[in-house]
Image (cartoon, helix red, strand yellow):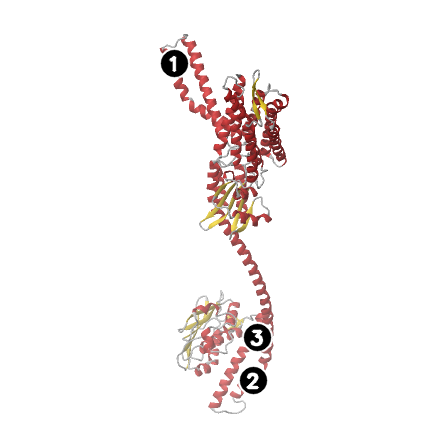
């Protein structure tokens, strides 16, 4: 009876284990193969036990003994295929190998129930002996070959495995070797060669070693993901045992002591009901207690999904660099989910843009090409049927494949390897991965754009650097050309100044009558010539000043200067030109003479002359008004015209060296563009500021302010001989630039 209880317990455990493993993943060939082996082992145990029961009908005993020979080849075949798949030793032609081997096993199984192997039965003292036929050695050789091949596969894979996988394989190999060795010896070798049937029951009971080894691998090293079933079963078993014990103790022991009667009376029934109600309230606390207890045993590597999602969300929100983002996400997934590898592959135009993980560069091209053929957003390798898709996943060590997609399309992959514990991915794992994948896709899209911007910036920076170098080289050449130009202007100005000065002196003497009298007409022509010669000399002076500025030799020689004299003198110099251009030249002198200032007289005179001359030139048939006045802080000189004005878009550049407004070029083609530049420099070097305002087509105002000294001791010049308003006849016109 004890032997039957042990065999029945082992059979029930094997049968239940097989069904649980199959239900957990019915698409996996590994699970299917193991489930078939476990179920067939249970069938073989029950059949073998009852095959020795001589109380049964003779024909029933015959067929039970035949079934004990029919089942082993098929069961060993299932176990052999499970070992190939589980250890990763499956060949790429696994389907063909499995088919050939399966047909062979089925043939041997049917051979076992024919008279060629099964020759009949013979009742002995306490067992039923099987009489073997002539081909029993063929049958036995197949059983032994399958047994040895099975053990060789398991032991041979140990060198390639590590961690939990290696430990699982050790326990599986050890338990299978011991159990099958005892079974083969007691149920095949001893009866066949020694006609000894005394140890058949020992062979049956020895299969408990398989149950024990596999159960330990499942519970301790996670052979299959059936921990939930085992853990919750253990929880409720412990809970029921505890409640039963507590009820028995309280209701019968303590109740018996209280009521002291063997019969159950009304008070005792009431006590029992109250006890049951009280224990009912302890159900939930006890359940939670045992759940925590069993979780600590079966789920020591459990993680908090919400905490993991929050942590990864924080990383995705705070990290913009693709490398840092991928590294931190991989680290969190590996640590929490305890997987052997996590890879993040980013695509650009269906080619690998970036990869973070375990793949080498040489694999990436083939990786992108192979994964592109995988359709579907999420693929779990364990749930895939054998075929090209599963081979691709196994080739790259992928347990879970996730295509990362945004509105723009597929941008990459999240590839998770196998769990270190050997478990399959649970529904919770897949929901977490799905949530993280959606967030990760958006973050990678942003990080990828950031990388592309950085690359563009780097490319742009390189191009800018190259262009800058070219500009520097061109600028150096321009500086050299500018220096040559300045040297030429300096030389030419010096060479021109002397003959101009001499010519100007002789021409002035002629006009003064030192060489004889002239008619008024001749005198007017000579005056115009002298005036133009004077302007030419001023232009040469401007060029010399520019040359001195470039050479750093432009200095202000400040002396007491009376602008009350200089301004009228310069107006008188330009009278003839104003008359020739039909411009009314008006001078508005200050009501009181302005104070004498410390200035460079010649340079200030030249600035005044440039401003008035420009106004005349750019005021065809208009009016130019020159004013000089003083306020409490400055001496103010202004020239206002009604000329062509300055375009608003070009006013900011007007005082730049050699710049001329577009409308000024049309009026005066021979301008140099240095007059206003010199005026600004002369005035600002003496502490003054430029006055300028203009409207195109309406006229302009040019001038300057020169600050008064803090304490002024006026040195008033004698009264002017000219009237307050000096007007040179002409017709009104418009100004300059």
Is disc 2 in contact with disc 1, using a CB cutoff of under 8 Å? no
Question: Which disc number belongs to residue 271?
Answer: 1
The residue depicted at 59 percent of the width and 38 percent of the height is 89
**Image coords of residue 600 (percent x, y):** 54, 72
- Dot 1 crowding, Cα within 10 Å, few <14, some 14–19, many 20+: some
**Image coords of residue 343 (percent x, y):** 54, 44
- Dot 3 crowding, Cα within 10 Å, few <14, some 14–19, many 20+: many
In the rendered image, the vertical position of residue 609 relative to residue 372, given as above or below: below
In what element is the residue under mark 2?
Answer: helix
Q: How many numbered marks, from 0 up?
A: 3
Residue 116: quarter of image: top right
The residue depicted at 51 percent of the width and 43 percent of the height is 401
For marks 2 and 1, the one nearer the N-term is 1
Residue 640: quarter of image: bottom left
For marks 1 and 3, the one nearer the N-term is 1
**Image coords of residue 500 (percent x, y):** 56, 82
Tell me the mark number nearer the camera, choosing from 2 and 1: 1
């Amino acid at each position: 009876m004890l032997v039957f209880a042990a065999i029945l317990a082992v059979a029930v455990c094997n049968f239940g284990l097989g069904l649980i493993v199959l239900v957990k993943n019915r698409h996996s060939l590994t699970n299917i193969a193991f489930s078939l082996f476990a179920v067939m082992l249970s069938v073989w145990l029950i059949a073998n036990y009852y095959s020795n029961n001589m109380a049964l009908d003779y024909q029933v005993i015959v067929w039970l003994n035949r079934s004990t020979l029919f089942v082993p080849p098929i069961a060993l075949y299932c176990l052999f295929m499970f070992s190939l798949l589980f250890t990763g030793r499956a060949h790429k032609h696994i389907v063909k190998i499995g088919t050939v081997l399966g047909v062979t096993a089925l043939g041997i199984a049917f051979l076992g129930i024919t008279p060629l192997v099964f020759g009949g039965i013979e009742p002995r003292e306490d067992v039923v002996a099987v009489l073997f036929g002539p081909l029993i050695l063929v049958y036995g050789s197949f059983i032994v070959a399958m047994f040895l091949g099975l053990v060789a596969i398991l032991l041979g894979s140990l060198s390639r495995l590590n961690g939990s996988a290696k430990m699982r394989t050790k326990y599986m190999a050890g338990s299978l070797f011991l159990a099958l060795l005892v079974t083969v010896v007691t149920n095949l070798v001893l009866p066949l060669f020694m006609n000894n049937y005394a140890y058949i029951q020992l062979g049956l009971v020895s299969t408990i070693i398989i149950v024990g080894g596999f159960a330990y691998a499942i519970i301790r090293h996670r052979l299959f993901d059936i921990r939930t079933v085992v853990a919750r079963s253990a929880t409720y078993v412990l809970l029921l045992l505890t409640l039963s014990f507590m009820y028995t103790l309280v209701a019968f022991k303590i109740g018996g002591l209280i009521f002291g009667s063997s019969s159950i009376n009304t008070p005792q029934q009431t006590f029992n009901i109250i006890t049951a109600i009280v224990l009912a309230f302890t159900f939930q606390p006890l359940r939670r207690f045992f759940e925590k207890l069993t979780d600590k045993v079966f789920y020591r590597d459990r993680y908090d999904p919400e905490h993991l999602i929050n942590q990864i969300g924080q990383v995705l929100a705070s990290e913009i660099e693709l490398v840092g983002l991928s590294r931190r996400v991989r680290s969190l997934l590996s640590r929490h989910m305890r997987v052997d590898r996590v890879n993040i592959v980013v695509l650009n135009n269906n080619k690998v843009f970036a990869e973070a993980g375990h793949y080498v560069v040489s694999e990436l091209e083939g990786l992108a090409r192979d994964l592109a053929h995988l359709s579907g957003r999420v693929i779990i390798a364990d749930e895939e049927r054998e075929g090209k898709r599963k081979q691709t996943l196994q080739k790259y060590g992928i347990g879970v494949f996730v295509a990362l997609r945004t509105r723009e399309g597929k941008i990459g992959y999240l590839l998770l390897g196998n769990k270190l514990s050997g478990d399959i991915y649970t529904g919770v794992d897949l929901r977490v991965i799905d949530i993280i994948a959606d967030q990760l896709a958006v973050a990678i899209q942003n990080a990828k754009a950031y990388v592309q911007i950085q690359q563009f910036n780097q490319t742009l920076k390189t191009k800018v650097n190259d262009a800058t170098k070219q500009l520097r080289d061109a600028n150096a050449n321009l500086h050299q050309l500018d220096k040559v130009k300045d040297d030429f202007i300096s030389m030419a100005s010096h060479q021109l100044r002397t003959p101009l000065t001499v010519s100007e002196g002789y021409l002035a003497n002629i006009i003064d009558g030192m060489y004889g009298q002239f008619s008024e007409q001749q005198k007017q022509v000579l005056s115009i010539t002298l005036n133009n010669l004077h302007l030419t000399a001023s232009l040469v002076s401007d060029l010399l000043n520019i040359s001195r500025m470039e050479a750093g030799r432009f200095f202000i020689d400040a002396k007491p200067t009376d602008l009350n004299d200089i301004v009228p003198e310069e107006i008188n110099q330009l009278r003839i030109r104003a008359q020739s251009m039909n411009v009314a030249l008006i001078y508005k002198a200050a009501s009181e003479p302005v104070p004498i200032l410390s200035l460079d007289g010649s340079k200030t005179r030249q600035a005044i002359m440039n401003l008035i001359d420009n106004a005349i030139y750019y005021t065809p048939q208009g009016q130019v008004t020159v004013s000089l006045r003083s306020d409490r802080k400055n001496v103010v000189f202004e020239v206002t015209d009604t000329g062509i004005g300055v375009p608003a878009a070009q006013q900011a550049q007007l005082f730049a060296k050699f710049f001329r407004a577009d409308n000024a070029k049309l009026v005066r083609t021979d301008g140099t563009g240095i007059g206003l530049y010199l005026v600004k420099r002369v005035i600002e070097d003496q502490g003054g500021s430029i006055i300028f305002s203009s409207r195109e087509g309406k006229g302009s105002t040019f001038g300057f302010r020169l600050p008064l000294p803090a304490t002024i001791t006026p040195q008033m010049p004698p009264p002017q001989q000219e009237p307050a308003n000096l007007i040179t006849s002409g017709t009104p016109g418009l100004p300059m630039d």
